[in-house]
Amino acid sequence: MTRLNTKTLSALPATVRRPAYDRARLTPGIVHLGLGAFARAHLCEYTEDALELEFGAWGVTGASLQRPDQRDRLSPQDGLYTLLKRAPAGPDLRLIGCLGEVLVAPENPAALIARMASPDTRIVSLTVTEKGYCHDPATGRLKTDHPDIVHDLANPLSPRSAVGLIVAALKARRAAGLGPFTALSCDNLPHNGGVLRGLVRDFAALSDDGLSQWIEANGAFPATMVDRIVPATTEADIAEVAGLIGLEDAAPVIGEPFRQWAIQDVFAAGRPAWERVGAQMVSEVAPFEFMKLRMLNGAHSSLAYLGYLAGHETVAEASGDPVLARFLQGLWAEIIPTVPAPQGVVLADYADALLARFRNPAIRHRTWQIAMDGSQKLPQRLLGTIRDRLKAGGGIDHLALGVAAWMRYVSGTDEKGAVIDVRDPLAAEFATKATAAGRNAAALSRSLLGIEAIFGSDLPREERFTQAVERHLAALFEKGAKATAASLSA
């Protein structure tokens, strides 16, 4: 089959929306670190929309921080790829054209730093996941003993981490007499802009206090809240897109129709007209971010662990299970009292909309995919809510079951005895603890709760929490996920 690229655009069927601007005139203004599926389905589509309304120097240069896979898929396509939006009514196809070249940081970090330091670059955005920030999720501070940070401090011209790359580029800009770019985090981190600012400032101070002060005085680190369900692209998805567009696309992305982006409107050197295409430019992102982290992400993680254990491959299957749907309603009932509603939002309606999104049968968002990196996600998604509920004297049964389901999942075997592929920075530690505890819920919960990087020093001392987790974990071992969840509404 003929490959998608600039020369083959004319072969696309009329049903595929294509760029409504001259790509030959597009110049790069954004460098994006961590060019995964989410960024290409979210930031790039917003930017595509903005370019069609108000053309400017806002092309995107992508940068892969680990492997060349994305470059190898996208370069033969001149950066073009298909966004397939899946809705119950049928597929919607769009060709995204704002992405230009794709760089691979480990192959040539100097080239990436040079592009970030170029006067043309006005925004450096990133989606590197929680673990890509090389920080302690419990404190938000830079982990100076992280292997990538240790490497980057010793090798400042060939950094591995996003933080190291940003600091190297900002240092080059300062030396050239340029102002800083805007560093725009698009990851699901509480106060992501402030966290990134602190990490960049602290890293710079370890070698150049003057640079750190310059960044603090002149840098821009807007907070953001991003929302769109973007499942990992499968071989079946690639084959489906090829059949729909009549060309081979090695790098399509799949997403739901819904999207949301709240952005703190603080930029150092301009930005695309994102507000004209649906982004919410606000003075304070925290209420949106807080609502999403607790209500969407907290529910997503809890449902992923319970759903996986109950044998559901996707979120749609899990949320369509009446037992787990009742669990979600009970979970949201515990979460909502801890969430100040953003202006114009009714939280009960937001929960109803989330359930409808979860149940979209056209989106195959795997529970296993959401279950990844739980050690990095639990503190933000569930544990803060639990702390607030404990302080207020509120119930935590559903929240505690979410934590217990995570514990059951990281024990490493499912309810049929099959091995679970646990993907987490602490997977080896989980395996050691699970082997030692076996199916003893008291021993396993006590051991996992002792991981201070996840639970801090306070939660293991909260008997109401530890007892609820241990009770639920014992039930998960004895009765399974569905029966345990059902018992909460019995």
Image (cartoon, rainbow, N blue to C red):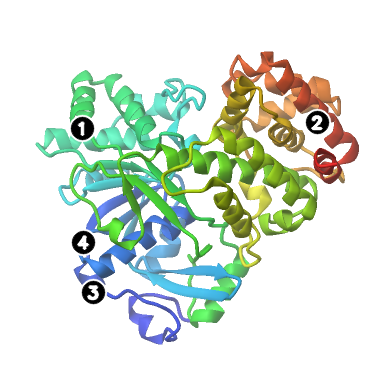
Q: CA distance from mark 1 to mark 3?
A: 34 Å
The percent coordinates of residue 399 (x first, y second) are 68, 34
Question: Who comes first in sequence, dot 4 or dot 3?
Answer: 3
Query: What amino acid is labelled 3 in the image?
Result: Asp
Q: Which residue occupies 79% across, 43% down?
A: 419
Question: Image quadrant of residue 128?
Answer: top left
Q: Tag 1: Cα neighbours inside 10 Å, few (<14), some, or many (≥20)?
A: many
Residue where numbered disc 1 is placed: 171
Q: 299 or 195: nearer the eye?
A: 299
Q: Which residue occupies 87% across, 46% down?
A: 416
The percent coordinates of residue 291 (x first, y second) are 50, 41
Q: CA distance from mark 4 to mark 3?
A: 11 Å
Q: Tag 4: Cα neighbours inside 10 Å, few (<14), some, or many (≥20)?
A: some
State which mark lies toward you, 1 or 3: 3
Numbered tag placed on residue 27 in the rendering: 4
State which mark lies toward you, 2 or 1: 2
Q: Which residue occupies 37% across, 38% down?
A: 162
Residue where numbered disc 3 is placed: 22
SS assignment at label 1: helix
For residue 28, above or below residue 458: below
SS assignment at label 2: helix
Question: Who comes first in sequence, dot 4 or dot 2?
Answer: 4
Query: What amino acid is labelled 4 in the image?
Result: Thr
Numbered tag placed on residue 473 in the rendering: 2
